[in-house]
Amino acid sequence: MSKNHRSEAFGKTESGFLWCLHCERAYEEDDYRVVEKDGEEFQMCHYEGCNGSTVTDGWAWEDYREKHPDAPKKPEIGKVYPLYPE
Ligand SMILES: [Zn+2]
């Protein structure tokens, strides 16, 4: 298994979850999709069809919760947690 690019760059999250800035859903930190392009490996958001990257678009779940204190400690997989409340 390849190394997790994001945790190599920023360290592991406290919560073990990432929140994606593109699709506004959370997933387990190591549950990313691997996409190969031009011989390079990219680690992308867990959700099919999302072009968010773990490194540039993945927020640690605890950072999301800092702005959204009502969010649960452990996010629901597949659920959308909007950045801005309606
Ligand atoms: Zn995403």
Image (cartoon, grey):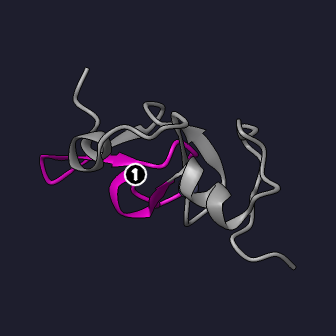
Which residue is painted at 26% across and 20% down in the image? 1
Give the magenta part as a residue range.
Answer: 36-59
Residue 4 appears at what percent x and percent y?
A: 29, 35
Seen as rendered, the residue at the extreme top is 1
- Residue 8 shown in magenta: no
Residue 14 appears at what percent x and percent y?
A: 48, 38
- Residue 51 versus residue 81: which sits nearer the camera? 81
Residue 49 in sight: no
Residue identifier under label 1? 54
Q: Which image quadrant for residue 23?
A: bottom right
Dot 1 falls on a residue whose secondary structure is helix
- Residue 56 shown in magenta: yes
In the displayed structure, does residue 61 sit left or right of residue 44?
A: right
User: Does residue 54 lie above or below 8 as drawn?
Assistant: below
Which residue is painted at 74% across and 66% down in the image? 82
Q: Quadrant of the C terminus?
A: bottom right
User: Does residue 63 lie above or below 7 as drawn?
Assistant: below
Residue 31 appears at what percent x and percent y?
A: 48, 32
